[in-house]
Image: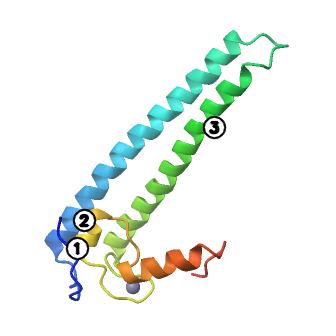
Amino acid sequence: MHCSREEQTVALTQTQVSKLGRELDKQYESLLEEVRDALEKSENQQYVELIDRAPADSGDQATGDALADLNLAIIDRHVQELRDIEAARVRIRDGGFGTCIDCGGDIGFERLLAYATAKRCFVCQRQHEKTYAHEANPKL
Ligand SMILES: [Zn+2]
């Protein structure tokens, strides 16, 4: 690993954008796969529960619910990431991809390689996270 350089970032080339686009496609596919997987597990879990549980017994329910909740939390996070990827694809198509939504500067290829759905440059992201920690509804 090398240290991140402070030199200014440059606009993305078409080749870089295509590469990142393919990266987004790959991430999208594997996320979808995981969501399907989690959905399946949570459905099976509920199914098993319906069969096993005696109507009056609620003692074991908590375990099943906790598992279902965990799966839902995973699905929830993945769905959020899928939305981020979709938004990034729209920015690739309509323009604005690789441009920081806060300062309008270039996000930079290296940062996008590590984090292809990035909407902000490193400096603005750090600022955003600081603000976001205190504010429930960040202004857009
Ligand atoms: Zn910025």
The percent position of residue 52, horizontal first and vertical second, equals 68, 10
Could you say which is closer to the camera, residue 47 or residue 137? 137
Query: Where's residue 123, x and y in %?
Result: 39, 83
* Residue appearing at x 41%, y 89% in the figure: 103
* Secondary structure at numbered mark 2: helix
Q: Quadrant of residue 24?
A: bottom left
Decide if residue 117 is on the left or right side of residue 54: left
Compared to residue 33, the image places residue 94 above or below, namely: below
Q: Could you tell whether 76 is left or right of 111 in the image?
A: right
Tag 2 residue: 113
In the rendered image, the quadrant that contains the N terminus is: bottom left
The amino acid beneath tag 3 is Asp
Residue that extends furthest to the right in the rendered view of this protein: 56
Q: Which amino acid type corresponds to the residue marked 1 in the rendered image?
A: Phe
N-term mark: 2 or 3: 3
The answer to whether the residue labelled 1 contacts the one labelled 2, judged by CB atoms less than 8 Å apart, is yes
Categorize mark 3 by other alpha carbons within 10 Å: few (<14), some (14-19), many (20+): few
- With 59 as the anchor, is 83 left or right in this view? left
Q: Which image quadrant: the C terminus?
A: bottom right
Residue 76 in sight: yes
Q: Residue lying furthest left in this view?
A: 15
Q: Residues within 10 Å of mark 2 (few under 14, many from 20)?
A: some
Instruction: Name the residue type under label 2.
Output: Leu
**Residue, disc 3:** 69
Circle 3 sits in a helix, a strand or a loop, which is it? Answer: helix
Marks 3 and 1 sit apart, C-alpha to C-alpha, by: 37 Å
| Among the 4 quarters of the image, the one containing residue 55 | top right
In the image, 109 versus 21, the foreground residue is 109
What residue do we see at 25% from left, 57% from top? 23
How far apart in space, not on screen, are marks 2 and 3 (Cα)?
A: 32 Å
Disc on res. 109: 1
Q: Position of residue 111 (x, y in %)?
A: 28, 71
